[in-house]
Image (spheres, helix red, strand yellow):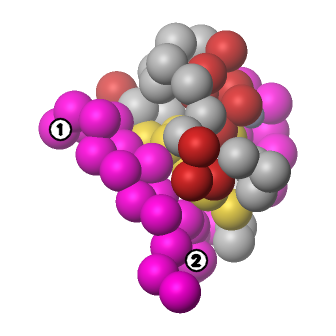
Amino acid sequence: MSMFRQRITNHRKIFFNYTRDIVCFSCKQDLHDSYTVSGNRGKTRCVPCAVKFHIIDEIPKEIEGEV
Ligand SMILES: [Zn+2]
């Protein structure tokens, strides 16, 4: 099964982070092996924080229950 991936704008996308050792900019959750949202200025967030901070409008239906 291929992992869900979505481009919002040039700098905003949702992807599954297999390899990068990063934490959510807002809540500091470890994002290794997690769905991750890249935002402007290199800020990456978990999906719930990306919704909370209006980077994306809502959690995509395809990954509900996995974030
Ligand atoms: Zn977060």
Picture layout, residue 52 above or below residue 8: above
Task: Compare marks 2 and 1 and give the one earlier in the sequence.
Answer: 1
Q: Residue at x 17, y 38 (%)?
A: 10
Which residue position is annotated with label 2? 18
| Mark identifier at residue 10 | 1
Q: Amino acid at mark 2?
A: Tyr
Quick one: SS at disc 2? Answer: loop
Q: Kindly give the residue lying farthest to the left in the view shown.
A: 10
Q: Residue at x 67, y 15 (%)?
A: 52
Tell me where the magenta segment starts and ends, as one range: 1-30
21 in the magenta segment: yes
Quadrant in which ligand 1 is drawn: top right
Residue 19 picture location, percent across and down: 57, 78
Residue 2 picture location, percent across and down: 47, 81
Residue 58 picture location, percent across and down: 57, 25
Q: CA distance from mark 2 to mark 1?
A: 21 Å
36 displayed left or right of 42? right
The answer to whether residue 22 shows anywhere in this view is: no
